[in-house]
């Protein structure tokens, strides 16, 4: 999840909504993505889609059986569909609201327990 949060920080650095995603299989990172809608001017360039595209290149295939997705924010309908269509086996959501993630970014990505409990997703 730390890598997904790092990806979210990259999105924030180019003025995109800070969302990150990392796809992992058997302990190996297959693809990482950050939200790139603004920088790419692409409405589909959400973190999950970017990560899926990068993982598909690395795998030379689109089937993500056995892959776990670590995402910093609950996937939208498009990304949930893309993850499902890619056959990603597990999706772990950090359950941060954008408001909380922005707060975390402002506080140099302190761990949630350092900022207080997260009670809503
Ligand atoms: Zn999305």
Image (cartoon, grey):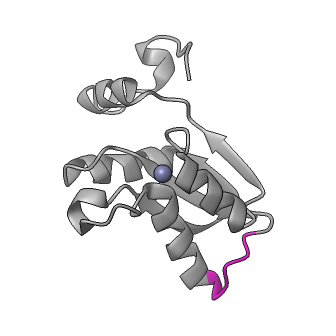
Which image quadrant is residue 110 in?
top left
Q: Is residue 41 above or below residue 21?
A: below
Name the magenta segment's main secondary structure: loop
Q: Residue at x 61, y 62 (%)?
A: 82
Front residue (pair 63, 76): 76
The answer to if 62 sits in the magenta stretch is: yes
Whether residue 96 sits left or right of residue 41 in the image: it is: right
Q: Residue at x 26, y 50 (%)?
A: 16
Residue 117 in the image: state x and y as whole percent: 52, 12
Whether residue 80 sits left or right of residue 7 in the image: it is: right
Q: Quadrant of the N terminus?
A: top right
Front residue (pair 109, 20): 20
Residue 59 in the image: state x and y as whole percent: 65, 83
The answer to if 111 sits in the magenta stretch is: no
Front residue (pair 67, 121): 121
Q: Is residue 114 above or below residue 79?
A: above
Q: Quadrant of the C terminus?
A: top right
Point out the residue furthest to the bottom here: 60
Whether residue 22 sits left or right of residue 86 in the image: it is: left
Q: Is residue 102 above or below residue 33?
A: above
Q: Residue at x 50, y 44 (%)?
A: 2
Q: Residue at x 32, y 46 (%)?
A: 9
Which image quadrant is residue 84 in?
bottom right
Residue numbers of the magenta segment: 59-64
Residue 80 in the image: state x and y as whole percent: 62, 51
Residue 85 in the image: state x and y as whole percent: 70, 66
Whether residue 121 sits left or right of residue 20 in the image: it is: right
Answer yes or no: is residue 37 visible.
yes
């Amino acid at each position: 999840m730390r890598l997904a949060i790092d990806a979210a920080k990259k999105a924030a650095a180019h003025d995109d909504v800070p969302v990150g995603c990392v796809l992992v299989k058997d302990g190996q990172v297959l693809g990482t993505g950050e939200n790139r809608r603004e920088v790419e001017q692409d409405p589909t360039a959400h973190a999950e889609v970017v990560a899926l595209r990068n993982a598909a290149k690395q795998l030379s295939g689109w089937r993500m059986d056995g892959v776990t997705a670590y995402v910093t924010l609950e996937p939208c309908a498009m990304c949930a569909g893309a993850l499902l269509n890619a056959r990603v086996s597990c999706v772990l959501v950090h359950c941060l609201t954008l408001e909380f993630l922005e707060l975390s970014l402002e506080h140099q990505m302190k761990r949630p327990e350092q900022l207080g409990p997260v009670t809503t997703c």
